[in-house]
Image (tube, rainbow, N blue to C red):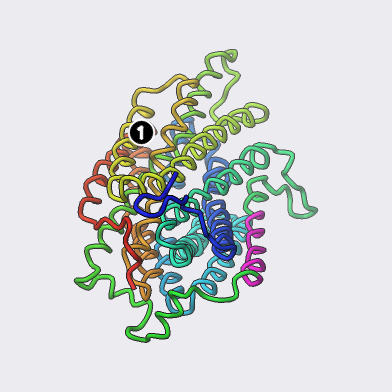
Amino acid sequence: MRAEGHSSQPWYHGITRHQWTVLVIASLGWIFDTFEGQVYVSSMNEAMPDLLPGMDGLDSSERAGRLAYFNNIAFGAFLLGGAAGGVAFGILGDRIGRVKALILTIATYSAFTFVSAFSTEWWHLVSFRFLVAMGVGGEWAVAASLVAEVFPKRARAWSLAIFHASSVFGTWLAVAVGAYIVAGREFEIHFAGLGTVASWRVGFAAGALPALLILVIRWKLRVETEAWSRSRLSGKERAGRALELFRPALRRRTLVGISLAAIGLATFWGVHIYGKDLLRAEMEKQIAVQAPAGSVGGAASGDLFARLKRWEMLGMLLASTGGGAGLLAFGAFAEGIGRRRAFVLYHLVGLATALALFQWVSAPIAVLIALPVFGFFTLGMHAGYAVYFPELFPTRVRSTGAGLCFNFARIVAAPVLFLSGWLQRHGGMTLRGSASLLSLLFLLGAAVIAAGPETKDTDLPE
C-alpha cells in the first residue's frame, strides 16, 4: 500500500539500514517486554493457586472467584508498576537519551521476571509483577519515541504499527511457555533438599534471557537520534519536565492520550485476555458432558489438566494472532483515513465483537472462529498509541509524554480491574458478565478521540 499524500513510492522506499536496525531492535525490546507481561497470563491459573493457602478445600465456584480476585490484584499491581516505570523511564529517556534508557528498562523487566520464579507467597508474586511492570512501561515509551524520531513522516505510521505489532511474537512466546512448560509437567524439576520446582517457575526463570538484548543494543546503537541531540543542544527548555504536559499548550493532548490508553488497558486486561478463558470454560463443559459421571473434578489434573491448558493456550494464540493482524492494519488505516477515524473504527467494532463473543457465542467451534476477529479489534487499536502519542508532543518531552499517557493510564485502569475481580468473587458476576460490562468502555473511547488533534501528514513537533 502506498503512503497517501506523498510520492508514488511505497512507504519503505529509501529507508536506510540504520533505520531498519532501530526498528528491529525496538521491536525486539517490545517483543520481550510483552513476553514478560504475558507469561503471567499464560500461567496465572497455576502460579497463583500454588501460592494461596486453602484452595484445595474450595468448591469450583469459590475457587474460581478467589482466583479471579487475587489475579486481578496482580494485574492491578502490574498496571500501577507500569505507570510508575513509564513516567520515570520516560523522563529519563528525555534527559539521558533514548538508547541508555532503553537498556535500563530491559535490564529491569528481565531481572524481576527471573526473580518472580522464587516467589513463596502470593504477595511476593504481586510485588515482583509491580517491579517487572516498571521496566515494561518504560521500554514502550522510550522505544516508541526512538522509532518516531528515526523514521521519516511518510513512514512513521507504518513503522510504529510494525513496532507495536511485534508484540504478538512476545505473546506467542508466552503461549509456548503455557502450552509446553506449564502444561507439560515434564518440565517440573527436582532439586535435592529443595523439593519439586513447579513448571510455572521455570517459565518465569526464562524471563532472564531478554537481558542478552542489551549487548546487541550496545553494539548496534552507539549514538542518539538527531532530534534528541538537537533538542539537547538548543537548551531552550529543560528536557523531561512532566509538569509541562499539563500546561495549556499540551494539557488537552495529554488528557486525550491518558484517556485513550486507560480505556485500552482496562479493556485489554478486563476483556481481551479472557477470550482464552472463555474457550477453556466451554471446552471444560463439553468434556464434563462427554466424560463418565464423577470423572471430572473441580481442579483438573494429569491428562485433563494438560488438555484444558492447551485449549486455553490455543484461545490465547488465536486472539493474539488476530490482534497482531489488527495492530499491523492500524498503520494502513491511520495512513489512509487518519488517526482519529482509525481509532473510532476500532473502538466501535471492538465493542460489537466483544459483546457478540461474551453474550451470544457459546459453542467451542464458534468461539474458535470468533477469537481472531475479536482480537483484531480489541488489541489492534493499541498500535494507535505508538503511532499517535509521539506525534502529540515536542522532542524535549516526547518520551515523557508518550510514557505518561500510556502508563499513567494504568493508574486509572487498575481500579476497574479491582472492581472486576470483586464482582466475580463477591458479586456473583460471571466471566461473561464482567467482560461484557467492561467492553462498554470501547464506546467511551470512540467519543474521547474526538477531542484530540488529527496528526496525519504533520511533522513531529520540535
Instruction: Report helix, strand or loop for mark 1.
Output: helix
Tell me: 123 left or right of 306: left
On the question of residue 177 being in view, the answer is: yes
Kindly identify which residue carries mark 1.
354
In this rendered view, identify the residue nearer to me: 221 or 83. Answer: 221
> Dot 1: within a 10 Å radius of its alpha carbon, few (fewer than 14), some, or many (20 or more) residues?
many
- In terms of depth relative to the viewer, which is nearer, 89 or 228? 228
The residue at the point 32 percent across, 69 percent down is 461
Q: In this figure, what is the number of numbered marks? A: 1
Quadrant assignment for the C terminus: bottom left
Position of 51 relative to 131 (above/below): above
Does the magenta run of residues contain 218? yes
Q: Evaluate whether residue 134 shows in this view.
A: no
Amino acid bearing label 1: Ala
Instruction: Classify residue 36 by image quadrant.
Output: bottom right
Horizontal and vertical percent position of residue 14: 52, 59
Range covered by the magenta-colored residues: 205-219
Q: Quadrant of the N terminus?
A: top left
Q: Residue at x 57, y 35 (%)?
A: 313
Viewer-closest of 231 and 397: 231
Q: Which residue lies furthest to the front in this view?
A: 8
- Queried whether the magenta region covers residue 65, the answer comes back as no
Q: Position of residue 336 (x, y in %)?
A: 35, 46
Secondary structure predominantly adopted by residues drawn in magenta: helix
**Residue displayed at 59% across by 41% down:** 175
Q: What residue is at 69 percent from the left and 37 percent from the top? A: 184
Pinpoint residue 273: horizontal percent, then vertical percent: 45, 40
Residue 97 appears at what percent x and percent y? 49, 76
Please name whichever residue, 264 or 151, is drawn nearer the observer in this view of the structure. 151
Horizontally, residue 338 falls left or right of residue 378, namely: left
On screen, 360 above or below 417? above
